[in-house]
Amino acid sequence: MAVSVCAQTYPSKTIRIVTGPAASGSDIVARLLAPGLSASLGQPVVVENRAGIIAVESSAKAPPDGHTLLVYGSVVWMEPLLRANAPWDPVRDFAPITLAARSPNILVVHPSLPVKTVKDLIALAKSKPGELRYASAGSGTTAQLAAELFKSMAGKLDIVHVPYKGLTPALIDLMSGRVHLSFAVAASVVSQTKSGKMKALAVTSAQPSPLTPGLPTMAEAGLPGYESVLTIGAFAPAKTPPAIITRLNQEMVQILNTAAVKDNLLATVTEVVGSTPEQLLAAGQADMARWSKVIREAGIKSD
């Protein structure tokens, strides 16, 4: 009875969507969802930007009444793998709503590097152990994880990690030739690959991506089973009534599948998904299984 009454009276006040820094992928998704949710639910929906750990922790501790939601990337389930004292459990502390969107990384190299394919890069790395350097936006980021998975699957390649304090300096040094390659978030490098400032070798999604037409996957390029994709999900605190989760899922999936939202996300090289709660949970569990071994073997820890 309590669940039924709660669902009938929901929402009864302003809804907060907690998300990442302004202009990040999760922030863009949150701000595209907010107006549609406000219109369909009949209450104001505000977007609140917070840093990763703070955003996720505060959302996990919010009242489970559907008035505080979290829209965030895979840090939700990756951070507990990267630090022993993460203040949340991704399965215990959250109720999944929908896998909203996903975006692959792109393996890019400096144009001067004498390679045309992933197989060429593997051969070059094996011939020059310890001489190639890859850039990332910091320890524990998707770029490092994708690169370490590549190194492991290609035969434990000796390629040196150069972590930066942010994406911009990493890409500047890649374009200048100070580092040789990166597994960069697709949105950050598409224009540079088109202009010739970087050379794209492959996309990290399991299937060819409509976001990067003509670019082979890492699996097609010689590493069967390779996959590394940035996902953005919507969550509520654990113990949020199932009827509220169902309604939020229905509303969000409908909003995500509008032409305007799809076009806006495509412009940021992001693909709409709009899944069931169960599919979001399965995606998180698959990520945790895939990355725990890579993180352990490479000794990766977040900054």
Image (tube, helix red, strand yellow):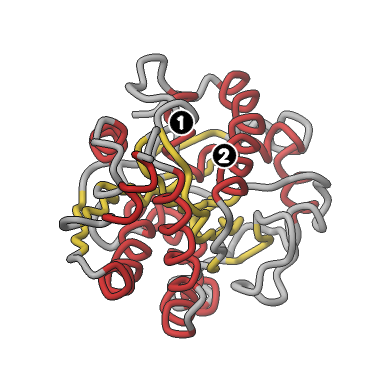
Decide if residue 120 is on the left or right side of residue 180. right
Residue 46 pos. (x, y %) = 18, 61
At 46% from the left and 53% from the top, the residue drawn is 232
At 69% from the left and 37% from the top, the residue drawn is 128
Q: Quadrant of residue 127?
A: top right
Helix, strand or loop for disc 1:
loop
Which of the pair 74/100 is nearer the observer? 100
Furthest-bottom residue in view?
259
Q: Give the answer, above or below, for where 61 lies relative to 114.
A: above
Q: Amino acid at mark 2?
A: Gly
At 67% from the left and 76% from the top, the residue drawn is 213
Which of the pair 92/270 is nearer the observer? 92
* Residue 205 can be seen in this image: yes
Residue 2 pos. (x, y %) = 34, 39
Q: Amino acid at mark 1?
A: Pro
Q: Quadrant of residue 124?
A: top right
Helix, strand or loop for disc 2:
helix
Q: Give the answer, above or below, for where 32 lies relative to 132.
A: below
Decide if residue 26 is on the left or right side of residue 291. left
Which of the pair 205/289 is nearer the observer? 289
Decide if residue 164 is on the left or right side of residue 103. left
Q: Give the answer, above or below, for where 281 lies relative to 80.
A: below
Q: Give the answer, above or below, for where 206 lies relative to 186.
A: above
Residue 32 pos. (x, y %) = 34, 71
Determine which of the numbered discs, if any, sits on residue 276 in the image: none
Name the residue beneath numbered marker 2.
284
Name the residue beneath numbered marker 1.
90
